[in-house]
Amino acid sequence: MSALLEVRGLRTVFHTRAGEVWAVDGVDVEVRRGECLGIVGESGSGKSVTFASVMGLVRSPGRVAEGQILFEGRDLRALSLREMRAVRGKEIAMTMQDALTALNPALTVGEQIREALEAHDETLPARGQPRRAAIRAKSVEMLGLVGIPSAESRLRQYPHEFSGGMRQRIMIAIALACRPKLLIADEPTTALDVTIQAQVLELITDIRARLGMSVVLITHDLGVVAEHCDRVMVMYAGQVVESGPTAEVIATPRHPYTRGLLASIPRPGLRGQPIRPIEGQVPDLIGMAPQCRFYSRCPVRREACLAPVAMRPAGAGRSARCVLLDEVPA
Amino acid sequence: MVAAPPAADSIFRRNLASFMGNRLALASAVVVLLFVLMAIFAPLIAPQDPYETDLFRRLQPPAWVEGGEWGYLLGCDALGRDIFSRIIYGARISIFVGLTVIVLATGIGIIAGLASGYLRGWVDIIISRIVDILLGFPYLIFAIGLMAMMGPGLGNIILALAYKEWVIPARVVRGETLAVRELEYVEAARALGASPRHIMLKEILPNILSPVVVVSTIRMANVIILEASLSFLGLGVQPPTASWGSMVSDGRAFILEAWWVSTFPGLAILLLVLAINVASQGLRDAFDPRFHE
């Protein structure tokens, strides 16, 4: 499988009054065709900013400072604003974190799907009644695809008339309206309750298989990743700390942070034992020393960690950012 | 909390229903509507020709005062013209100027406000500076200055008022745009490749229209007063065209012996402006979620 999206050495900086914040600091991402890549990390780890950078959606005071973003071999950073708009929605679509606020309250659902289609779909008839009919048919088809019953009449309704799960589905329908090659789902389930979460994730997995697209699933839930993603990338404080095939990373985490994350998930096997959270706080990214960013919270830190730590190979298709890998070869 | 609104109900329609429930505002809206109808059908309603002078009826008092006549309900002015008919015709000027200025100003203000609020950068700096400068001028003095340069006349009144009036909707739109542009659905639209024009007109504008409509109606009352002021000062519509402001001015000299000449057009201004104000308060209560119980 060749890479659909390849990001190399991405650095995104936010200029704030307190100083420069490198929210994304040297991130490499590879998304292959048809796969689902999970991005895991806590709030502020840079997972959303990484993909906002890919989409060219980082706004002042933020700026993509360095790095290459190759989509099907094209450098997205070199595109003009107009060319980039043609990529957004058509080639790469993104769903926003909060389904409850990501739909425009003043427009009907049908209008919002129509807008996506009108922006990018060139297969539509040029104008008039055939065009309207085609848009309508496609809109109904999209709502059907995401499992919304009686789509025909629901197109005329406003977002506030739908439940949270329904709105998330509608957002996915809008994102998928132009059949993008890559869907970036930014915490698609945060605002939803557990059963609806499962349904929405099933839906994404199902559509991915049917449309043959790639999915990047941004989440802070390792359980979600374990179930739905082929590969996983763990981010911490603006850097990737570990990446590899999901099953292997979860079975044998190589980075102390990944280990900490896994240890802090309650599991039936650990009944009766206290949950072990990772001690300490995410470090302040302003004026960060060039050391391992997990140093202050790491249970196995040593002197070598005070120097910059690079990603190291850690077995087939895996890598991690930890000096321990040098001591205990994988 | 009121009962949940019925399905398939837009925010606009819900707000409209809430407005209809406010009796005072509704009554005021009806008064405004009557004035508008009066202006439109002036030739059918006016009992006399508003321009016909008759020196025998010079300063004839209102019908219920001794010497009055029921055909000349509110009496006559110094040239013997029927005041009631002139008020009816004068409504045309007030309402036409009020509406045209507000439509022009709101149109310009929406474009300027959206551009400066959404695009930011130098567009915002330039537009905001112009707005600040214009806000610094006293309104009437600004209008008098412009009228002095352009000369009197209906078209010039509209221009003179619109030149300054647009800054009010522009500021409202800019502020609302600044708040709405940060919302997720605007970001979502950007993520789907929407152009700035599309985002401004299709995503942001429908969501900020309510406050703009409310502010515009409130401002319309102001514009009507300003038109009357300019006409009062003789800078507005030229005689013999009937305008409430110039009618008040005409009666100034006889205010002691013939109070009706100034008083009735003054009352007309008062009634229309009051009705617009109360109706727009009702609109604000209905359309601003902060006033919902």
Image (cartoon, rainbow, N blue to C red):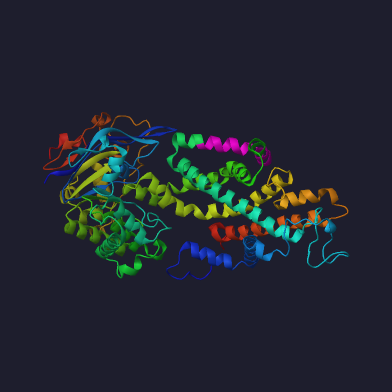
Residue visible at 18% across and 42% down? A72
Q: Position of residue A258 (x, y in %)?
A: 24, 45
Lateral position of residue A313 relative to residue B28, left or right: left
Q: What x and y, as percent, mark residue B103?
A: 55, 51
**Position above or below: B21 against A67:** below
- Image-based side of A8 in relation to B236, left or right: left
Task: Provide the major secondary structure of the magenta segment.
Answer: helix
Using residue B209 as the reference point, say whether residue B236 is left or right of it: right
User: Which image quadrant is residue A22 in?
Assistant: top left
Tell which of B133 and A67 is nearer to you.
B133
| Magenta region includes residue B143 | yes
Q: Quadrant of residue A163?
A: bottom left
Q: Is residue A63 above or below residue A266?
A: above
Answer yes or no: is residue A301 visible: no
**Which of the 4 image quadrants contains residue A15?**
top left
From this view, report whether residue A35 is shown above or below residue A168.
Answer: above
Q: Position of residue A244 (x, y in %)?
A: 17, 45
Q: Residue at x 23, y 46 (%)?
A: A259
In depth, the one of B290 and B230 nearer the eye is: B230
Quadrant holding the C terminus of chain A: top left
**Image spot of residue A160 (x, y percent):** 41, 62
Instruction: Report the span colored magenta.
Output: B127-144
Please name the residue shown 21% across and 57% down the image: A227
Decide if residue A175 is in sight here. Answer: yes
Q: Nearer the viewer, residue B133 or A328?
A: B133
Residue A167 falls within the magenta-colored stretch? no
